[in-house]
Image (cartoon, coloured by chain):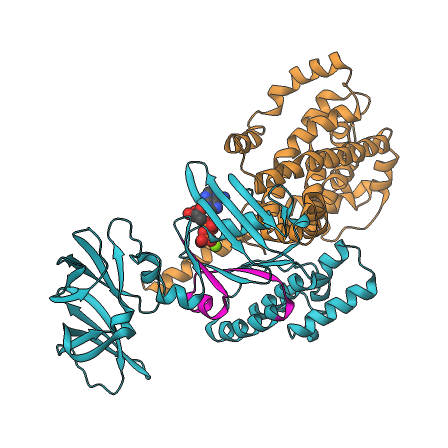
Chain colours: A cyan, B orange
Amino acid sequence: MAEIEIKGVGKTFGAFTALHSIDLTIKDQEFVVLLGASGCGKTTLLRIIAGLDSPSKGEVWIGGRRVDTLPPRERGISMVFQNYAVFPHLTVFENIAFGLRMQKLPQAEVTRRVTRTAELMHIEALLKRYSGQLSGGQRQRVAVARALAMEPDVILMDEPLSNLDALLRLEMRAELKGVLAASKTTTIYVTHDQVEAMSLADRIAVMHGGDIIQAERPVEVYRNPAARFVGSFIGNPPMNFLPATAAGEGRWQVAGLTFEGPRVAAPQIEFAIRPEDLHPADHGFEAEVRVVEPLGPHTLITASVAGVVMRAVLDSTLALATGDHITLSPVADRIRWFDLATQKAIA
Amino acid sequence: MSETTVRRAGNRVFIAAVVLACVWVLLPIYLLLINALSAPAEVTGFPKRFWPSFDLASIRFFLGFKGVTSALWNSVQVAVLTMVMAIGAGAPAGYALARFDFPGKQAFRFMVVMTRAFPLPLLALPLAVLFIRVGLDDTVIGLAFVHTTLALPFAVLITYSLFSGIPYELEEAALTLGCNRVQAFLKVVLPLAAPGIAASAVFAFVVSWNEVFASAVLTIEHRTLTAFLLQSLDVSPLPLKFAGGAALVLPALGFIFAVRKYLFAMWGIANR
Ligand SMILES: Nc1ncnc2c1ncn2[C@@H]1O[C@H](COP(=O)(O)OP(=O)(O)O)[C@@H](O)[C@H]1O
Ligand SMILES: [Mg+2]
C-alpha cells in the first residue's frame, strides 16, 4: 500500500516562491500526471516527494509514514530522470542491478530480477553494453528498467519521454502505460505534453505558477476546466473565450446572441466553448474565416467573431475559403462560464 | 593580391610560428639529452654529434656524486607528500565548488587563484623565519607544505572542472537507488573522476619536483635535487649539470605528457 499525501507543501528559492501550498492525495496504484508549462514547479514538487529537495513548509506522507525528513533511499521510491542518468561506468546489467546490490540481495535474485525487467523493457540483448553504446531510446529503457527492478511502492518520472523523437515517444508511451499498470506501483509522472497526460493518466493534476489548479480524471479536466487557465492550456487548439455581458435574470449577451447562463451578480463574465463544439448552423455567431487548415479528418478554421479570434474544428467535407462568412452555433450543454475576477469556473 | 595568396601567406606565417615554437621548446631538451647521454669528454667537445654516443659515464658520475642520491630521495619524498596533501585538500574543495552553492563561493574561487599572486621570493624570508620558530625548517614535511600551497590552486581548479563535468543527476539517481551521500560519491563519482584525479595528482607532483626557490631557501641538509643542483652549480663539472638537468626534466615532461588531456580541460581547451 502506498498512498501518497502531500499536505500544504511549499518551496521557496531565496525570494522566489516555486510552490505556494500544494495539497494532493494520490491513491495506491494510481497513475497521476503533473501537467503544466515549463517553470510551473512540476520538477520541484517531484523532487520534494523523492527527497532530493526538502520542502520549505508542509508534509509528505507515503504509505502512512511521514517521509519529508527521510533521505530518498528510505522512502520506497524510484525515480526516472529526464536525462536518464544511466551510469556511464557500468554495463546495462550493472545499472539495473545497482539498487539491488545496495539492498545486498543474493546474486541469484539480482540476476533473476535484472533479467526479468530487461525482458519487460525489451533490452535483454543490451545487458553487456555501456551507456555510451546506447541510443536515447535504449537509455530510456534502461532507466525505466533500473527503476522497476527495485520493485518500489512509488515510481516518479520527470518528463521521461521529452528527449525522444516523436515516433519513439508514441511507442514508448503505450509501452510505459502497459508496464506500469502491470507493476502495481503508484506513479507520479511529470510532463508538459497534454496529449501524453491525457493518454496516460488516471488523474491529471494541472499546475500553474506553483499551484495545482485542478486534479481530476482527464476527461473531466478537458470537459469541465475548473479555471480559465485549464481550458486555455489543455486542448489543441485550446478553448475559445468570448466576453459576456449581463442581460438580467441569468441571461447573457455574447457577440450579439443571448444565452441562458449562471445567475450571478457580476456585470460581465466570460463565455467559453471548445472548438469542436461549434457547428455550422442557420442561427449562431457571425464569423469571418481568416485561416483554413485541412487536417485530414477535420478542418481547422480560425475565424473572427465580433473582433475576437475563435477556432472551430469542422467537418473536412465543408468547402471554406478565407474571407467566407459562416454562422457557428455552440452546443448548448458544452458551454462553460468563467468569472473574470477569480478566473474560476462558474457552476 | 587575391584571397588565396593572402591565405597562403597567412598559412606560411602560421607554419613558421609553429616551427619556431617547437624549436624553442625542443632544442634545449635535445641538447640536454645529447650531453647527458655522452661521455664526459664529449660534453665539453665541439662540434656535437647528431646522435648521442649513449655512453652512461655522465649519468653514472652524476649518480655517484656525493649528495645526489639523497637529494633525489628528498625530491621524491617532498613531491609525494605534496601530491597527497594537494589532492587531499584540493579535491574536496573542487567538489564543493562544483556541487554546492554557499555564501562566499565567488570570493573563495578568487582566493584560490590569488594564492599564486604573491611571488615566492617575497614570502620566502618570512616563511623561513616562521619555519625556524616552529621547527619546520630544513624538513621534508615543511617544504612539502610550501609546495602544497603552490600546487593547491591547480588541484582545486582541475578537480573543480572534473566534478562539474559529472552530471549531478547521476549522484541523485544513486541516492534514489539506496545510496547515502558518501556511497553515491564512492560508487558513482569517484570511478568517473579517478583518471582526472590521478592526473591532477601527477601535476602536483611535478609542481613540487620542479620547484627550486623555496627548496633552496628553506632547506640546508635536506635539499631536493633542484636545490642541490643550484647550490653546486658553480662547483660541479659540466657533465654533472647536464645529467642532473636531464634527471629533473625527463620525469616532469613524461608525466605532463601523460596527463595533458586533463590539463587542457582545466584551461577550458577542448579535449585533444
Ligand atoms: N535550485 C533552484 N534555485 C532557484 N530557482 C529554482 C531552482 N530550481 C527551480 N527553480 C525555479 O523554480 C521554478 C520551477 O522550476 P521547476 O520545478 O524546475 O519547473 P518545471 O519542472 O515545471 O519546468 C522555475 O521558475 C525555476 O527557475
Ligand atoms: Mg522540469
The x, y position of residue A1, in whole percent, is: 65, 58
The extreme top residue here reads B133
In the depicted structure, whether residue A104 falls above or below residue B88: below
Q: Is residue A188 magenta?
A: yes
Residue drawn at x 59%, y 69% as measured from the top left = A181
The x, y position of residue B225, in whole percent, is: 77, 32
Q: Is residue B74 left or right of residue A176?
A: right
Determine if residue B8 is in view.
yes
Q: Nearer the viewer, residue A95 or A299?
A: A299
The extreme bottom residue here reads A317
Dividing the picture into quadrants, the one containing residue A326 is bottom left
Residue drawn at x 77%, y 40% as measured from the top left = B247
The x, y position of residue A84, in whole percent, is: 58, 60
- Quarter of the image for the C terminus of chain B: give it: bottom right
Q: Nearer the viewer, residue A161 or B27?
A: A161
- Quarter of the image for the N terminus of chain B: give it: bottom left
Q: Is residue B153 magenta?
A: no
Q: Is residue A32 left or right of residue A250?
A: right
Read off the magenta span.
A182-207
Q: Nearer the viewer, residue A131 or A313?
A: A313
The x, y position of residue A286, in whole percent, is: 13, 73
Residue drawn at x 66%, y 34% as measured from the top left = B151
- Disc tally is 0
Determine if residue B23 is in view.
no
